[in-house]
Image (tube, rainbow, N blue to C red):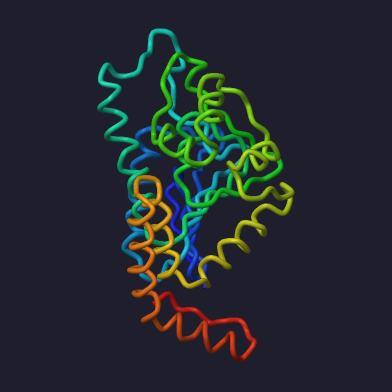
Amino acid sequence: MSTTRDDAAVLTRCIDSVTVITLNRPERLNVIDDVLAKRLRTEVARVGEDRSCRCLVITGSGRAFCAGQALPAREEEALPEDVAGLIRERYLPIIMGLYRLTIPVLAAVNGLATGAGFSLALAADIRIASEAAWFSCGFSKIGLVPDAGATYFLPRLVGISQATRLAFSGERVAALSAQQMGLVASVHPAEDFEVAYLAVADELAHGPTAALARTKQALRASFHASLDQQLELEAQLQQASSLTSDFREGLRAFRERRPPNFRGH
């Protein structure tokens, strides 16, 4: 079953238990202006309330995933004086909305991902990329500091040394290089990219999503927990998972040598 919501700035498709949100301003490289930000925030919140959705995909239309913040086109134009307020209002709800989702979040990076668009991709649980994709932190190129969560996610993905280099230089990183440094999990031919990311999303959606949510919790906690704290958290989360119907189904499938039919509870 597939349903679609389309309001020009953002296209949302629901394909069985997968929701695909597409940034849909290809002529502007899917830059984030106020309209697109509000629609994206709304759709992410909607996914969080939709119990039928078991995986979220974010991608872009055209040759860009997202070129980041919409910048002034002419010298006489300027960003608002309260840039901090703009960041808090525009980006915080989107990034935190994605971060708080318990279902898997997949960034399907179809093209360029720069600035806040780079940050948006980093906020996903998993990133896969088209061969046509490339990444740039970009902020330093215009004398700004990485925002929208980039300084949080990037060092956790590639380490502090590599993150510092990418943030300082703003260099352009091709898809295969991004895979080698751990930014993306896999790279796929551009002509087959939609098929590839939908296959990944479908596999995640049909996984034990309650256990995956607890796995997210454990992995995130590991960055600030001591070993004994982490071991205790694992014990608690495993106790909860061992009581689920998915665990019982997983055991049956293992014994019967068949694929499990997980239901996410």
Residue 49 sits above or below residue 123 on the image: below
Q: 112 left or right of 208?
A: right
Residue 39 in view in this figure = no
Residue that sits furthest to the bottom in the current view: 256
| Quadrant hosting residue 229 | bottom left
Horizontal and vertical percent position of residue 139:
47, 22
Q: Nearer the viewer, residue 193 or 211?
A: 211
Horizontal and vertical percent position of residue 122:
49, 41
Q: Nearer the viewer, residue 84 or 33?
A: 84
Q: Residue at x 30, y 43 (%)?
A: 93
Q: Residue at x 34, y 74 (%)?
A: 240
Q: Nearer the viewer, residue 35 or 140?
A: 140
In the rendered picture of this protein, how many numbered marks are placed on residues?
0
| Quadrant hosting residue 61 | top right
Horizontal and vertical percent position of residue 124:
47, 48
Q: Residue at x 35, y 66 (%)?
A: 50
Instruction: Specify the quadrant that holds the C terminus.
Output: bottom left
Residue 154 sits above or below residue 97 on the image: above
Horizontal and vertical percent position of residue 175:
67, 39
Q: 99 left or right of 59?
A: left
